[in-house]
Amino acid sequence: MDPLSLRRLERERFAAQFTDPTIGRQLDELVKSNDILSGTESQRLRSYFSNNGLEPARHLDIYGRAIMMGDLESIKLFYNASLDEYGLKCDSGDTARAAATREIYEKRWGPTRVPVYNLILLSTLIMPPMRRQHLEVARWLIDEAKVPVDGKDLSGSTALHHAISTKPAFDPEYAQMLYDAGGIVTLRNRYGGTPAHEIVMTWDPTNREAVRKAADALKWYLDHGGNLEIKDSDGVAVRHSVNSTKNFARKGIQMETWRVVDTEDRRRANLAGKICTFCGREPGGDVRLLLCSKCRVAHYCSGGRPCQKADWPYHKSVCKATPTA
């Protein structure tokens, strides 16, 4: 068989996996679940997610439309109405506020189950002139309504994940707002990936704007506690993906992501023992560094950050108890 026919056959076999009922769970089961996926199941959900985007006119209710329009006054009215309603059912004002906040947090729109902060990000892309109003809505939800920023869509991705993954757009201003409100950059979605797994997918290395944006996004990710060693559910780490692009050098193409990774590697090496082994951040405020109790070499953030637990799948292979004297 000639090479062209062979590649065509391989593509047909790959596409057939999505509909082959003997390979993994089918789409209706995946949509109803929220577990981590790999292989064919992961690709099956990715395909569904990419082809079934939110249609505002069709999928948004009155609250969602207020979000899309950046109508903060209406959103406040909805919240106060919920407070009044829950106030009649709850035994305290705090309980009523928690219920009203939970109601917003649990809202989802469209076939991909877009949560409120993800919808705000999408709204900034659909209606750029309303961006200031959209960010004001986000600020109010964070500061006043106290709505957590970790809501996930059908793919298991938070708004912070989408805001820095360059898909649909790299938005460092909004990402910083979400991060400051407690967002975690290393959360894995249902494909097992972090935002960096999306960032380093470079389909066209000759597109300088896309390459530059990817480098900026990767730097933001690393500056805010990102980790290159986390593997997705198919066992691929971000560092491996970056290294695999170095074959472009033979064609005279230089990827800015290489520079970002090399610079961060040098920084972490120079500060070893003074920064968190996992997130690379220096202690500050209420956060201090704690030694791994077994090897007494690795350092991790205190203060409730999930660094040590997140690093254990990678650290356990090198963690050895310190010999006693």
Image: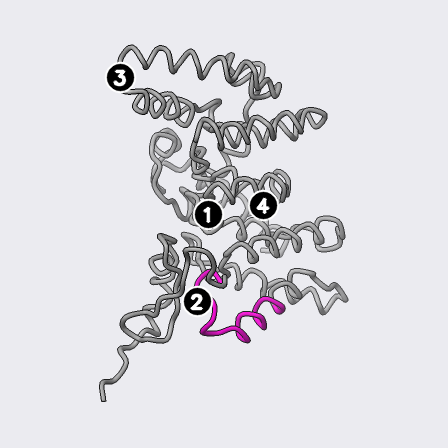
Q: With 309 as the anchor, is 123 left or right in this view?
A: right
Q: Amino acid under label 4?
A: Ile
Q: Secondary structure at mark 4?
A: helix
Q: Which residues are magenta?
A: 262-280
Q: CA distance from mark 4 to mark 3?
A: 39 Å
Q: x%, y% of residue 156?
A: 43, 39
The quadrant in which residue 299 appears is bottom left
Q: Amino acid under label 3?
A: Cys
In the image, residue 275 lies in the stretch drawn in magenta: yes
Question: 68 above or below 201?
Answer: above
Q: Amino acid under label 2?
A: Thr
Taking depth in this image into account, of 46 and 232 the one nearest to the observer is 232
Residue at left offset 43%, top offset 31%? 146
Q: Sequence order check: which comes first, mark 4 or mark 2?
A: 4
Q: What residue sits right under mark 1 in the picture?
A: 184
Q: With 315 as the anchor, is 11 left or right in this view?
A: right
Taking depth in this image into account, of 182 and 56 the one nearest to the observer is 182
Badge number at residue 164: 4
Q: Sequence order check: which comes first, mark 1 or mark 4?
A: 4
The quadrant in which residue 127 appears is top right
In the image, residue 61 lies in the stretch drawn in magenta: no
Residue at left offset 60%, top offset 41%? 167
Q: Residue furthest bottom?
A: 325
Q: x%, y% of residue 110?
A: 48, 22
Q: Sequence order check: which comes first, mark 3 or mark 2?
A: 3
Q: What residue sits right under mark 2 in the picture?
A: 277
Q: CA distance from mark 4 to mark 2?
A: 22 Å
